[in-house]
Image: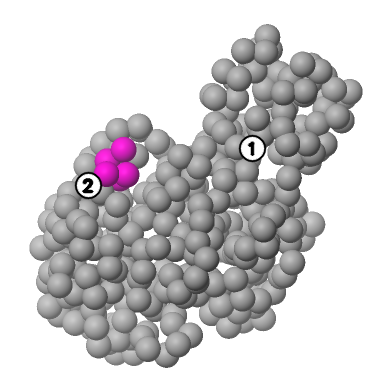
Amino acid sequence: MDPRNTTPEALEQWAAAHGCDPRVVRRLLSTIFQRGVYEPSAWMGESQIPKRLVEAVAPLPLPRLTLDGSVVSPVDGFQKLRFRTSEGLPLETVLIPLHKEGAVSLCLSSQVGCAMGCVFCATARMTTRRNLAAWEIIDQFLQARELVRSQGRRVTGAVFMGMGEPFLNYDNVVAAAELLRCSSAGSVAAKAITISTVGLVPEIDRFTREGHRYRLAVSLGAATDAKRKELVPVASRWPVADVMAAARRYALARRDRVTLAYVCISGVNVDEDDARALGELIGDTPVRVDLIEVTDPTGRFAPPTADELRAFRDALSRHVGQPIVRRYSGGKDIQAACGTLAGVI
């Protein structure tokens, strides 16, 4: 048992099976997450973790990702970290400076590579792919938070929008999120944690049924099946209407808006017809539409011109009638923007 690799609830059950109560679990999590002690043999002293529990932890010491690269954008202050797994696979984490002074949100990866095949995304072009264990997701957070603190700043949020499709690694992503929000561990407010998906309908419904308090973001790409299949190949598995219906079930169950992430591509999905189709798709579902300008280092897809984007936003205002936000995708100069993470520093 690696305490970073399961939910706090499961950790309490494991501890109970070894004759320990929840207070021991809280001390254990605090020792790892707050004090940064990863050697189990050191837990028995000051933290008073019973020997029988320490001996049940494996592997020893707790493994860590290797940080082998870091780059900061001189343009907007975004910082990208590259880690290596035990077998040398690259994964990346982005430090996002927020408007509130000193506050940082972490963009975490859930997989190495991605099988969703979005045609404008560099991560989809990576040849090696695998799920990350919950501890590998958590270790991104812990190492990035340590760096943020050394800079005199603080981590106030986390988004699962880095490499990979989080809902293809559902159990590990949810376990990591549970640890992030635990007051004895990550201490990040649930409402400040966002999990993104390109639209895996069964997993969206599972997420809704389980009643998680994290925010949900659904990446649409386009509002019609024909156009979406060209941009997001997974769309062929679920019609966009089914994706929107699942998003609606989530929004109504949570009594909150669901975020619809819409990657804007010049000449592809930003005309009047696209705005009209999006309005018809959304209907009266409570949403917030985040407009994200595509960043494609290959040059195949270009962001909208200022005039295109202005006209599209005006059209959305007429057809959607709900909050429309232009989301800044920073770190373009260091390949840290949305859709550019590919293990390159």
Name the main secondary structure of what is drawn in magenta. Answer: helix
- Helix or strand or loop: what does disc 1 sit on? loop
Picture quadrant of residue 311: bottom left
Q: Residues within 10 Å of mark 1 (few under 14, many from 20)?
A: many
Which-is-in-front pick, marks 1 and 2?
Answer: 1
Q: Amino acid at mark 2?
A: Ala
Q: Residues within 10 Å of mark 2 (few under 14, many from 20)?
A: many
Going from N to C along the chain, the mark reached first, 1 or 2, is 1
Distance between the alpha carbons at the discs numbered 1 and 2: 31 Å
Do tag 1 and tag 2 residues touch (Cβ < 8 Å)?
A: no
Q: Is residue 81 above or below residue 38?
A: below
Residue 292: where, in percent of width, then height?
A: 38, 72
Magenta segment boundaries in residue numbering:
202-206
Q: Amino acid at mark 1?
A: Arg
Q: Is residue 179 left or right of residue 145?
A: left
Question: Which residue does the numbered mark 2 point to in the structure image?
Answer: 246
